[in-house]
Amino acid sequence: MHVDARSSARGVDLTVTVPSGAVTALLGPNGAGKSTLLAFAAGLVRPDEGTVRIGARMLTDTGSGHYVPPHRRRVALLAQDPLLFPHLDVLQNVAFAPRSRGDGRARSIRIARDRLDTVGALDLADRRPRELSGGQAQRVALARALAADPDVLLLDEPFAALDADSAPMMRRVLREVLQETSRTTVLVTHDQVDALTLAHRVAVVENGRVVETGTVHDVLRAPRSTFAATIAGVNSIEGRFTAPDVLTTASGTDIRGHTDEPVVTGSAGVALLHPTAVAVFVDAPVGSPRNVLPVEIDHVESTGASVRITSVSTGGLRPLHADVTVAAATELDLVPGRRVFFVVKAGEVALHRARDPHARLDP
């Protein structure tokens, strides 16, 4: 599936190609444009400009005025709210999908029973939606989406409305279903657990653009966007390469590190440093090549065996994190408002080229 669409009202300029037969997770903060991308694909929102296609089948083309209505797209959307018909029992709810596609009643019932069995909900066939728990209702909604036999399955944060017990169970069900069907799937989430357990690839959306793409392993191991770095638990500093081993921020701070890929002077890049690699000094250190960042402590929190020190955003840098021992935090009197130095060796800093904001997933 390929989406290349823009909407000024929604502030998005989205371009992404989703590989066939794989699960792609859309990660990003709230309001980034993830759900809008799904709405473009499902035909629920028409872009000001752009195209949407599945394989060779064009669904939206604003240039020619071509537009396939949602019910003819062979695209199924499963949202946070199951949206089951309250006046129909579970079996009839699921059978509605093939019936609306044109299948006869008997065939639709057979398909509905089969899909309910697939998601482990056949025993719920005679119940009404009001008799279902949140997790049960979401299973039924998934069965209905599968019963439509879509070319593409769109999942918009399907676990967000579930409780702590239902969400892991639903995640297991969905994982089994996706492995069994090998259906092209796009999963919107802000939870790295969903990406790790369900997806093959990731696309990160920030401020209305796809800013990073790749396999789940590559993106979380070496994130090149702010959101991906956040969920991967590492510090990220953006800038431009002024030398092969130096990244300079917009405020003029030089970050020295190492890179395993060719870089072009002046090109955008990102420096990654793990909180455990950041030492905290009360006085500026001297000695071996190090990155020394003067910061003000914003807040301090316990993370179990260690203490996380978070800096105030300043000098064009986002808040940075340093993990130190409880003893060190006590001895150095690391409290909010204190000015200290975050220090990290150049060998602990990985420098990467920034992703093209218009990057596409390989088909």
Image (cartoon, rainbow, N blue to C red):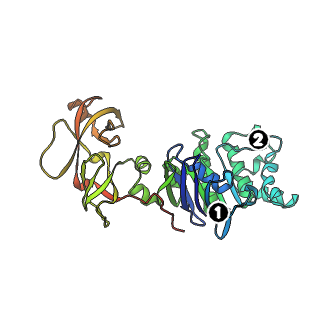
Residue 148 place in picture, x, y as percent: 74, 58
The residue mark sitting in front, 1 or 2, is 1
- Work out how far the residue at label 1 is from the one at label 2, CA to CA, in angstroms: 42 Å
Q: Is residue 354 above or below residue 11?
A: below
**Where is mark 2, residue-wise?**
129
Residue 134 place in picture, x, y as percent: 67, 40
Query: Dots 1 and 2: beta carbons under 8 Å?
Result: no
Amino acid residing under circle 2: Pro
Left or right of 227 in this view: 102 = right
Q: Is residue 183 visible?
A: no
Bin the neighbour count of mark 1 within 10 Å (Cα to Cα): few under 14, some 14-19, many 20 and up: few
Please name the residue shown 27% across and 48% down the image: 277
**Where is mark 1, residue-wise?**
63
The quadrant of the rendering that contains the C terminus is: bottom right
Q: Is residue 356 above or below residue 333?
A: below
Please name the residue shown 29% across and 33% down the image: 297
Secondary structure beneath label 1: loop
Secondary structure beneath label 2: helix
Which quadrant of the figure has residue 82?
top right
The quadrant of the rendering that contains the N terminus is: bottom right
Left or right of 216 in this view: 131 = right
Q: Earlier in the sequence, mark 1 or mark 2?
A: 1
Amino acid residing under circle 1: Gly
Q: Nearer the viewer, residue 95 or 211?
A: 211
Which quadrant of the figure has residue 327?
top left
